[in-house]
Amino acid sequence: MMRMKKMKQWTDDEKKQLKIFLFVNFGMTIIMGFLMGFSSRKGNDVTIFASAQMMYPAAAVILARMLTAGKDKKMPKKFFVTYLITAGLALLLTISSVFFSSEMCFWAENYVLMLGSILAWIMLLWEKKEVRDDFGLRFGGHNVKQSFLMMFLFLVLYILRLVLASIPDGLGELKAVFIAPETWITVVVLVINFYLSFIAFFGEEYGWRFFLQPMLQSRFGLKGGVILLGVIWGLWHLPLNVFFYSPDTWIYSILLHQITCISFSVFFGYAYGKTGNLWVPIVIHYINNNMAVVLTQSADLGNQVYRWQDILTALVINGIVFMPFLFTKVYNGDKA
């Protein structure tokens, strides 16, 4: 299990890394948020901004580590450089979408992320095992059974949340989705697609779970740190709330993301703490983002309309399904 110390002061290097992380991650989010707003007002599809933004957290961590590393510090440079190039190309295509065909740029970005994912797998396998271990990238050395159990548990909880949310309107529609053949065909496709698109989900989890979570927990405690992480993670989505997810009801969208990110932060942190395996929250994040595709047979997540009832429902259901994990041994004491 992963060791998490609490209530310690950050070192000078950690302070530098945190400043670089926040400056790059949130700086890019704010700058691209203005561009997203401009593009949205032009009538463009701004979906491309969402997938590019997923790359910012890991890019910020990588730059922070590179800028504060000593000359003799070994790091997975082949993987890191591959990631930064992929993120840079995604960023350029996103900027281009403001002035040129947003659809063409979006599809080009998909191919960039696919090629980047394939090359990143190769580079990861190329890196030395001890280097992967030092930077949270190791494949082996984990409890495999525990790791798969956490992934399966999240899937069960995700479905439970759907069932609870569907009860007021009846479960007929949800049942029809689960017995439809195309649902299970999509599931098989998504399993394969993970290997071709993991780089974006790695982008968020390397920033939030691997870097920022232990930083916050070391200073604010295991529970306080993970809750604060959820708040920060939710605020990071703000430009997407306003210009992509729900332009007409963006205040509700912001509140909804606070609830979702805090509760997910608790469970993702729990799964990471139980396994010490970063690939577990990466896969869980992938499952969460893509289950909507399975259930709706559509990848369009934009222009949603929310009501205050949706906020209350999310608060109750997420509180029931995910928040109890905050009171497990993972968040109790100095060890997880």
Image (cartoon, rainbow, N blue to C red):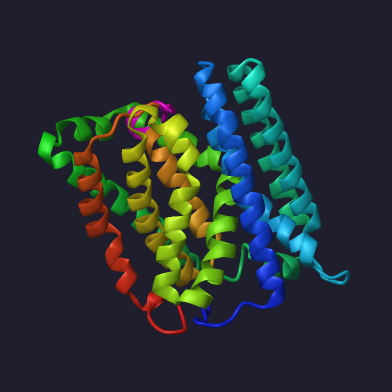
- Up-down relation of residue 173 to residue 224 (above or below): above
Query: Residue 297: image x %, image y %?
Result: 37, 26
Instruction: Please tell me in which quadrant of the rendered image residue 329 appears.
Output: bottom left
Q: Is residue 66 among the parts visible in the rendering?
A: yes
- Residue at point 67% right, 28% down? 95
Residue 76 falls left or right of residue 155: right
The picture places residue 201, in percent across and down from the top left corner, at 55, 47
Q: Nearer the viewer, residue 83 or 208?
A: 208
Q: Residue at x 53, y 36 (%)?
A: 50
Segment colored magenta: 294-302
Mostly what secondary structure, the magenta segment? loop
Q: Is residue 203 left or right of residue 245?
A: right
Q: Is residue 299 magenta?
A: yes
| Most foreground residue, 103 or 7 | 7
Residue 140 vertical placement versus 184 (above, below): below
Q: Residue 190: x, y in percent?
A: 48, 37
State yes or no: residue 13 in magenta.
no
